[in-house]
Amino acid sequence: MPSFRTQAVALPHGAGAESALATNRVIRNTYLLLAMTLLFSAASAAAAVALKLPHPGIILTLVGYFGLLFAITRFRDSGLGVGLVFALTGFMGYTLGPIVSHYLGLPNGGQTVMLAMGGTAAIFLGLSAYVLTTKKDFSFMGGFLTAGILLAFLAGLGAIFFEIPALSLTVSAAFVLLMSGLILYETSNIIHGGETNYVMATVSLFVSIFNLFTSLLHLLGFTSNSD
């Protein structure tokens, strides 16, 4: 979830240079680890598709996700934290495999999956490049994103348990917007020194990309079925 830490301190020249170097190091480490975890998650998803593994179910998925997230937060300043990030992203890749298999089985399923992947990449790269180039501060979005993600998450659970397709589509559309906002927020947070731990920054960006992809996949899959 978004952090509420902001910085409004005027630093002397020497401290500013040191801060800039630290920030660049966090950015470099974050994107390096993010790239590796995305590849690892994709490999896990591909293996789940190839082996036709069943989805673990909503309960096990939530327990696994929040359990690993808690452990990462606990050990974020140690080497174990990095290993736990791979455990989390690999687990999420496994849960994604059966979902991708479902959409691949639909008419034009391959095209739907590729469009979702392309859309996710375009949104992430475009928003990240915008923040890195303009260095605009999006810290003001923290409270809105926290409330929005919580409401959308609860609404998504309601859509699953009560089987309400219209609500599920609405939640997916909301998550596309919220995850786009989270990418802006987290990237800005790194640049402006609000997030100094690349492990937590990687997890936040990975979760944004994961949810963005699954939401686009749901929306595009529905559109394809309607046609």
Image (cartoon, grey):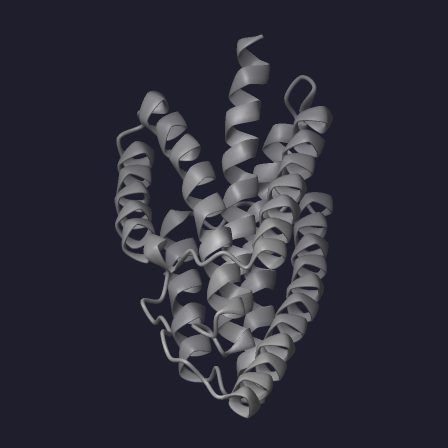
Q: Is residue 38 left or right of residue 18?
A: right
Q: Confirm whether residue 52 shows in the render.
A: no
In the rendering, at what x and y percent does residue 197 appear? 50, 78
In the rendering, at what x and y percent does residue 72 appear? 46, 76
Question: At 40% across and 82% down in the image, what residue appears?
Answer: 74
Residues 83 and 53: in front is 83
Residue 6 quadrant: bottom left
As drawn, 39 above or below 115: below
In the rendering, at what x and y percent does residue 181 appear? 44, 47
Q: Is residue 94 left or right of residue 72?
A: right
Question: At 56% across and 45% down in the image, what residue appears?
Answer: 54
Question: At 43% across and 31% down in the image, what residue appears?
Answer: 173
As drawn, 217 above or below 97: above
Q: Confirm whether residue 202 shows in the render.
A: yes
Residue 38 quadrant: bottom right
Q: Is residue 118 left or right of residue 225?
A: right
* Quadrant (top left/top right/bottom left/bottom right) for the C terminus: top right
Residue 171 quadrant: top left
Q: Is residue 113 left or right of residue 1?
A: right
Question: At 63% across and 83% down in the image, what residue appears?
Answer: 21
Which residue, as the protein is rendered here, is positioned at the far bottom?
14
